Image: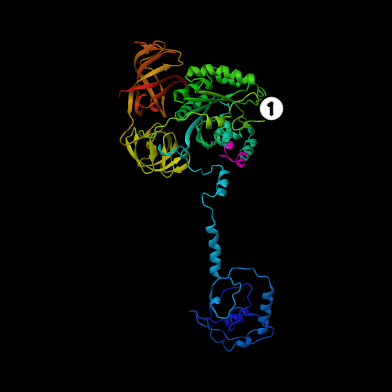
Amino acid sequence: MADQQKKTLNPNAPVFVPNANARAFVPGQNIHPVVAAPSPQPPAAPVAAPVSTPAPTPTPPSAPTQPPVSNGEQHLKQSANAPVEAKPPVADVSSKVEGASVGPVDTWDEKEEETEEPRSQVPLQDDPELDEEESTSIAPVIKPKHRRDPTAPADARMEHVNVIFIGHVDAGKSTIGGQIMYLTGMVDKRTLEKYEREAKEKNRESWYLSWALDTNLEEREKGKTVEVGRAYFETEKKHFTILDAPGHKSFVPNMISGASQADLAVLVISARKGEFETGFDRGGQTREHAMLVKTAGVRHLCVLVNKMDDTTVNWDEERYIEIQNKLTPYLKKCGFNPKTDIHYFPCSGLTGAFLKERPEATIGSWYHGPCFIEFIDNHLPPMSRDFDGPIRVVIVDKFNDMGTIVIGKVESGAVVKGQSISLMPNRTTVQVIQLWSDEVETDDVGSGENVRMKLKGIEDTDVLPGFILCSLDSPCKVGRIFDAEVVILEHKSIICTGYSCVLHIHAAVEEVTVKVLICTIDKKTGAKVKSRFVKQDEKCIMRLESAEMFCLEAFKDFPQMGRFTLRDEGRTIAIGKVLKVVE
C-alpha cells in the first residue's frame, strides 16, 4: 500500500507538513483537515490557495487503486475523538486557505520557536539562583571587589589583607586554614568528604582538612607542608589571602618568602602537653617564625592556641593562661606591642570551635572575647596602602602556561592590563597582557594584592624569584654592595671581615660577604664604636657585598625592600635593614 502511494505522489503538490494526528495522505485529495460529515461525501476538488506554491494537478488514471474515502473519514473521526495537545495556532500555508479550519498542525516554524524560547530564559550573572549554585562549588567565581581607585567611595571597596599561618611543625596550621575555607564557603562539604575518605584509606583521618591547602602528593603523604600554600576567602568586609607557611626547620627559606608578602601573621600554638614546649624551646620554630615575620614587616600578630580539645588539655583555662604568660615576653622582645599588636584566641582546628562561631556553652565558657574571623573582620586596624606610588611588584614565583606567568605581591602603585613596565634587575621592558587577583581575572590590580601576571616580551627562564616589576619612569635601585644596620641574634663565634652567609631580602636569596665592619652600636646609648668584630646580641653597621646584582632599596625610602635576614648553617643568625646602596 505504501509503495503504491509513493508511486502516485504529485511532485507539484504543496510542501508536506507531517502531523501525527492527521489522516493518511491520499494523492489527489485535499491536504487540509476537513470537518467530518454525518454521511459519506465524494472527495472535494482541491481549492486553489492564494499562495505562490502551485496547485495540485489532477490525479493520474491509477486513481482506482486509492483506498475508499470512507476509510479516510473514519480515520478523521477517530483522530477527532483522540485527545490532542493544545498548541497556539501558527500561521502557515493552511491558515491562508479560505474556508479551511485552523487545527493543531505542527510546523517547522513552531519547533524553531520552541528551541529558541529556552535561550531567552537562561539566567544572567545577576540571577540570585545562579549565585547560590556558584557559592557551593569548590572555587566559586567571586566578583572581584578590589580597591581600584583611592577616590572611590568606601562602600565600593573591599580591603585586601594577606594572612600568613606560622608556627612549629604539626601545630595545625594547614588544618586551621582548611577549616576556615570550609566555614567561609570556599570549600564545599562534598570535597571535604572526598578528602576524608582518601585520608582514611591512608590511615591519616585527622589530616583531611589540611588537604585543602596541601595539594602536593608529597605533602599529603608525609603530612608536612613544603611550599607556601595559597588560597583565599572573603568575609562581609574584607578579602583575605591565606599563605600557609611550612613549619619544618628545613623549609624556613620558603617561610621567609611567604612572610615577605604578609600583612597579618597568625601564630598557631599546639596546647597539647609537650608540643608547645618543644616548639617554644631554643631551636623550635615558634621562636624563629615570630622573629622572622617581625623582620619581614608584619605589624599585627594573632596567636591561635590550637588543640584545646585534646585529651591532655580538655579546654583547660590554666593551660591557656600558662601558654600566654610564657609567650608574651618573647613576642615583646621581638618588637610586638602586647597591648595593641598581639591577640590570643583558644580554638580547635579540627572542630572549628572559636574560629567563626562559639561552640556549646559547656566548652570554653571561660573565654569571653571575639571569635577569630569576627576579630579580623571587624577589629583589625586598616592596612596602609600606597596606590599613588611607583609600581613595585615583588616576584615570588614563575611558570610557563602558554606564555610567561609570574606570581607576586603589589607592594606599591597599580598595574593595568596592557601596560608596559620594566623588569629589574634585567632592565627588560615587558607588557602585561593578562592579570589575575587571587585566581580571579581582572583588568587592574592595586597595592596589597597577591597577583598573577602574564608577561609579553620575556621568557620564563629569564625570570627569578626576587625580581621586581617597576614603572618605566621610576625603576628600583639595583646593587651588590650596600651598608646595613645588623643585629646579631644567635651566633657561637665572632663575625668579622670576610664572613660569608646567605641574605634573604624580600623574595631574593643571595650569598653575601662582610666586606667591612664599620662600627658597633651601643643598644642603650646609641653610641658608635669602631670594632674589628661583632658577637651575639650586639648591634653594628657593616658593608656587605654579593656576587650578583639584585634589587634593593634603602629602608627609609621603601621599607618593604629594605629589610633582610641573614642565615647560616640552617639557622637565622641576624636581622637588619639597608642604610645605603653603595654600588
The quarter of the image holding the C terminus is: top left
In the rendered image, which residue does mark 1 sit on? Answer: 362
Above or below, comparing residue 352 to residue 103 in the picture:
above
Residue 491 is at least partly visible in this image: yes
Q: Residue at x 35, y 17 (%)?
A: 542
Does the magenta-highlighted stretch encompass residue 185? Answer: yes
Horizontal placement of 74 versus 407: left or right?
Answer: right
Q: What residue type is labelled 1?
A: Thr
Which residue is outermost to the bottom?
61
Residue 156 place in picture, x, y as percent: 46, 40
Image: magenta residue range? 182-192
Residue located 49% across and 17% down the image: 333
Q: Which residue is drawn at 44% across and 23% down?
A: 295
Q: Where is residue 389 in the image (x, y as percent from the top left)?
A: 36, 33
Q: Which residue is drawn at 53% across and 65% down?
A: 112
Does residue 562 appear to the left or right of 311 in the view shown? left
Assess whether residue 580 is covered by the magenta stretch. Answer: no
List x then y, in percent, for residue 152: 42, 39
* Mark 1 residue element: loop
